[in-house]
Structures are given as structure tokens and as C-alpha cells.
Image (cartoon, grey):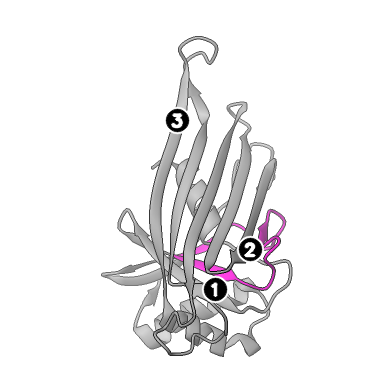
């Protein structure tokens, strides 16, 4: 997976910052290429749960279970113009209709050095249940999905060859399933009175992994 594809995927899944703060949250995880990833979904604002000007837009969490390590990962986008958010548009909304739950996200980023752009669309659906934790609390009330099934469509920015004749660019389709981490969701929502932003929530999750689960916090990873 090249850096553009990886950034497109993980920018979406692990960096949701709401227009308003304070939770409640749902925390999902899934494994890709040997690494677990966390989706920290803030339910506070369904219209735009994420946009490009949010302060921790490019920050997400990854971890491995053997060895037990957790760290922050950031993606600065294309820096050819000196601005990490140059020519990027990100939007995520979520909604619920009866027992149907959905997320819709799009990203567009100009790749300045190549004169083209990465463009991706994600759609996730899940079936809401009254008790996602088998009758136990997850720190909020309402119907929410135990799993989210994602589909991703992607056009990479880079061209190989002449685009007007036989040139090509990568066209991608992939799918995966994220699972609700009920224990972590409950613990995070129990602490929400002390947390103001989504970045606070991410820092709290790292501390929880270290102090309660015996993980080591690894150095932050940054991709330009």
C-alpha cells in the first residue's frame, strides 16, 4: 500500500474531530497489514463529524498486540506548497434510519508535485442493536452497530505514462469490517466528563492502553 493510499485510508478512519466536542464516542477497531487501527467516532455532530480544518484532523491511533505497543500516526499531506492542508477537502457525516447506520466520507487532495490528485470515497453501513454490549452499558443510550462494513473507492494521484494515450493511474476498491470495542467505548465514555476534545479522547486512550493494559507508548510516526 503506497503512502497516498495508506494516508487516504487512515486519515478517514482514525482522525475524527467534531465541530463540537465532548463525546459521547464509539470506538471501533480493525486490523490491516499486521497493525490494528482505532476509529474514534464522536457522535456529537452527525452533520459534519469531520472536516479539514479540525485541529487533530491528521492524527490517528495504531497498535500491535505482540509486542504491546500503541502510538499516534499523523499524515501531513502534500507539502510542496509549504502547507500541510493545502488543497485538501475532507467531509464525514453519519446517520441512522431505523436500525440502519451509515457513514459517508470523501477526501480530495491535490498532489502538487505531479499535477494530479488523490480522490477517495468511503461508505460504511451497520445494523443497530439495542444492546451492543449484550445487555451491559457502553456509556451511552440508543441503538448502535456492533460492526461497520466499509467499502472504499479510490483514484491515486500519480500517473504512469501519458494520460492521453496509454497512461494509467491506480484505481482501487477494498472493503473491511470494523468491530465495536465495547470495553474501551464504556471506559472512554465513563471518563468523558474530564475530556473536552477528540484529541483529549485519543490521549486518554493511549494512557488507558499503557496503564490498564500493559502497553508501551511508541514514538509518534509522521508521514509527509
Q: Does the image show residue 128?
A: yes
Is disc 3 surrounded by few (<14), some (14 to 19) or many (20+) residues within 10 Å? few
> Pointer 1: what residue?
202
> Residue 219, image x and y in percent?
44, 66
Q: Secondary structure at mark 1?
A: helix
Mark 1 or mark 3: which comes first in sequence? 3
Nearest to N terminus: mark 3 or mark 2? 2
Nearer the observer: mark 1 or 3; the answer is: 3
**One can see residue 220 in this view:** no
Query: Where in the figure is residue 180, as x and y percent of width and height?
Result: 43, 72
Instruction: Estimate how packed mark 1 is, as few (under 14), some (14 to 19) or many (20 or more) residues with alpha carbons within 10 Å.
Output: many
The local crowd at label 2, few if under 14, some if 14 to 19, many if 20 or more residues have their Cα within 10 Å, is: some
Q: Dot 3 lies on which element?
A: strand
Q: Residue at x 61, y 85 (%)?
A: 192
Q: Taking 80 as reference, is 52 above or below it? A: below
Q: Which residue is mark 2?
A: 56
Circle 2/circle 1 CB separation < 8 Å: yes
From mark 3 to mark 2, how far is it between C-alphas?
28 Å
Residue at horizontal 62 percent and vertical 63 percent from the top: 95
**Front-most of residues 164 and 123:** 123
Q: Total of numbered circles in the picture?
A: 3
Q: Where are the magenta residues, as a range?
A: 38-61
Q: CA distance from mark 1 to mark 3?
A: 32 Å
If you read the primary sequence from the N terminus, does the residue marked by circle 2 or circle 1 appear first?
Answer: 2
Q: Is residue 214 left or right of residue 166?
A: left
Q: Nearer the viewer, residue 122 or 97?
A: 97
Residue placed under numbered mark 3 in the picture: 170
- Would residue 148 be counted in the magenta stretch? no
Amino acid at each position: 500500500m503506497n503512502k497516498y493510499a495508506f494516508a487516504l485510508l487512515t486519515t478517514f478512519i482514525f482522525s475524527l474531530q467534531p465541530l463540537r466536542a465532548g463525546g459521547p464516542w464509539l470506538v471501533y477497531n480493525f486490523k490491516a497489514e499486521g497493525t490494528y487501527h482505532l476509529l474514534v467516532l464522536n457522535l456529537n455532530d452527525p452533520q459534519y463529524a469531520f472536516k479539514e480544518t479540525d485541529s487533530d484532523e491528521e492524527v490517528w491511533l495504531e497498535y500491535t498486540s505482540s509486542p504491546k505497543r500503541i502510538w499516534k500516526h499523523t499524515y501531513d499531506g502534500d507539502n510542496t506548497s509549504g502547507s500541510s492542508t493545502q488543497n485538501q477537502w475532507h467531509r464525514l457525516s453519519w446517520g441512522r434510519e431505523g436500525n440502519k447506520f451509515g457513514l459517508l466520507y470523501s477526501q480530495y487532495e491535490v498532489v502538487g508535485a505531479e499535477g494530479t490528485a488523490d480522490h477517495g470515497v468511503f461508505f460504511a453501513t451497520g445494523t443497530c442493536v439495542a444492546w451492543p454490549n449484550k445487555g451491559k452499558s457502553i456509556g451511552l443510550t440508543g441503538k448502535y452497530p456492533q460492526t461497520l462494513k466499509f467499502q472504499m473507492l479510490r483514484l491515486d494521484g500519480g500517473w504512469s505514462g501519458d494520460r492521453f494515450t496509454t497512461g494509467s493511474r491506480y484505481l482501487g476498491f477494498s472493503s473491511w469490517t470494523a468491530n465495536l470495542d465495547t470495553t474501551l467505548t464504556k471506559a472512554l465514555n465513563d471518563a468523558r466528563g474530564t475530556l473536552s476534545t477528540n484529541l483529549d479522547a485519543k490521549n486518554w486512550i493511549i494512557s488507558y492502553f499503557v496503564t490498564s493494559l500493559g502497553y508501551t507508548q511508541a514514538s509518534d510516526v509522521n508521514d509527509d
